[in-house]
């Protein structure tokens, strides 16, 4: 089996995906700058696999480095050549993801996400590696009211973070068009990845700065934050709170495994796929489910709507299901149980 180059592999989605890929027998080369993560997640990946009796000696190589620096990316390719473990594909998770931070500091986001990806693609060309799975986001879409989003719906991000993701998608399309007989590219638009690995050893470590509703809920449950602020109680939804499509992190990891396999087995192509469950859950439903499944209380209060928020963001995932033969298997109860298990076992993160 050939090797995979994973950028940002120590992060939330990266670490869970690396765990799955190692379990499936892939050899991984990771490049991470540990800006929003730490090496501890990778130690946990090893621990989980050791407990399962899976030996990963000679199967994972880590380079600390920056995608903004072409030399760091080259180091990874060179290492794979020296070890005669040639990199066949890239999974590109590395990126900054805070919408609020991107509004305050757009240059940082464009430089890191867009320039970093340009560097990566240039080095891939140089080493003749033309398979890539990219982490895109539902934030690229123009919001719709009360209807699922399809891949060919209008894209019109409303913040710099979303702009960087859409720009990278367009760049990838141009790269594909430059040599359509060689490039295999999948751009995966994630909806709301949440939850944790069932062991409770791997999860989302927000490094004390939770931004999204799910890690905020787990932090309220454990007593680190007093209450949840719900932005808007008058959205045109069943209970007035915003509806989102929450996808269990391990279902998302499985989506990457399926996308990679599909790309490698099929003819060169450019694919854009939604990775979501197709099921909408309101903020109040999520809180109530979390309380019920885990027998804890989540105090909350209502605040005004935030500028740029939407009532309803949900995937139509039929294309991913059909093409990848992938189905999200875990439901909102699993998400609430696994996320709480992780938070309880790791009250301060890794
Ligand atoms: N988590 C979400 O809600 C979500 C939703 C849609 C898309 N995404 C995208 O998925 C990808 C992974 O997200 P995540 O939730 O795992 O985030 P994360 O912050 O946990 O992980 C990102 C990883 O990339 C690394 N990184 C960032 N900039 C880097 C650089 N210049 N060089 C090397 N490494 C760098 C970080 O250190 C971290 O390990 C990101 O591109 C993000 O934009 C995430």
Image (cartoon, rainbow, N blue to C red):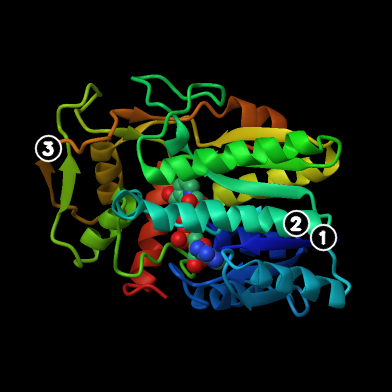
Q: Earlier in the sequence, mark 2 or mark 3?
A: 2
Left/right of residue 107 with respect to residue 265 in the rendered view: left
Q: Is residue 11 visible?
A: no
Q: Compared to 77, does 279 lie above or below?
A: above
Left/right of residue 155 with respect to residue 151 in the rendered view: left
Crowding at mark 1 (Cα within 10 Å: few <14, some 14-19, many 20+) = some
* Residue 263 placement (x, y as % from top left): 77, 42
Residue drawn at (27%, 47%), measured in percent from left and top? 292
- Name the secondary structure under disc 1: loop
- Quarter of the picture containing the N terminus is bottom right
Q: Compared to 241, does 114 lie above or below?
A: below
Q: Label 2 to label 3, Cα distance in Å?
A: 46 Å
Q: Compared to 340, does 54 lie above or below?
A: below
Along the line of sight, the residue nearer the viewer: 80 or 222? 80
**Are circles 2 and 3 on residues that touch, CB within 8 Å?**
no
Crowding at mark 3 (Cα within 10 Å: few <14, some 14-19, many 20+) = few
Give the label, 1 or 3, closer to the camera: 1
Crowding at mark 2 (Cα within 10 Å: few <14, some 14-19, many 20+) = many
Give the label, 2 or 3, closer to the camera: 2
- Name the secondary structure under disc 3: loop
Residue drawn at (40%, 19%), measured in percent from left and top? 147
Number of the label disc, if any, that sits on residue 127: 1
In the picture of the structure, the residue carrying the numbered disc 3 is 304
**Are circles 1 and 2 on residues that touch, CB within 8 Å?**
yes
Number of the label disc, if any, that sits on residue 124: 2
């Amino acid at each position: 089996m050939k090797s995979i180059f994973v950028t940002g592999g120590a992060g939330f989605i990266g670490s869970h995906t690396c765990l799955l890929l190692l379990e499936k027998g892939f050899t991984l080369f990771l490049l991470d700058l540990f800006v929003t993560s730490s090496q501890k997640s990778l130690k946990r990946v090893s621990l989980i696999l050791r407990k399962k009796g899976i030996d990963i000696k000679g199967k994972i190589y880590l380079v600390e480095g920056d995608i903004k620096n072409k030399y760091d990316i080259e180091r990874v390719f060179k290492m794979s050549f020296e070890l005669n473990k040639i990199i066949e594909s890239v999974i590109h998770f590395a990126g900054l993801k805070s919408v609020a931070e991107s509004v305050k500091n757009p240059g940082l986001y464009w430089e890191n996400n867009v320039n970093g990806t340009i560097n990566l693609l240039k080095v891939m060309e140089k080493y003749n590696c033309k398979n890539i799975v990219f982490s895109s986001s539902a934030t690229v879409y123009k919001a719709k009211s009360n209807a699922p989003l399809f891949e060919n719906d209008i894209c019109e991000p409303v913040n710099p973070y979303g702009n960087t993701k859409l720009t990278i998608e367009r760049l990838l399309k141009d790269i594909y068009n430059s040599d359509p007989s060689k490039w295999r590219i999948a751009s995966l638009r994630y909806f709301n990845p949440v939850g944790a690995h069932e062991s409770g050893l791997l999860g989302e470590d927000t490094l004390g700065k939770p931004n999204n509703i799910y890690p905020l809920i787990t932090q309220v449950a454990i007593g680190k934050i007093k209450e949840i602020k719900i932005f808007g109680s008058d959205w045109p939804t069943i209970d007035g709170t915003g509806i989102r499509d929450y996808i269990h992190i391990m279902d998302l990891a499985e989506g990457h495994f399926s996308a990679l396999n599909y790309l490698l087995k099929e003819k060169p192509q450019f694919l854009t796929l939604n990775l979501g469950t197709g099921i909408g859950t309101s903020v109040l439903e999520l809180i109530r489910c979390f309380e019920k499944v885990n027998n804890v209380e989540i105090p909350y209060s209502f605040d005004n709507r935030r500028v740029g928020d939407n009532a309803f963001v949900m995937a139509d995932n039929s294309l991913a299901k059909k093409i990848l033969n992938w189905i999200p298997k875990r439901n909102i109860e699993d998400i609430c149980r696994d996320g709480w298990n992780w938070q309880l076992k790791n009250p301060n993160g890794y």
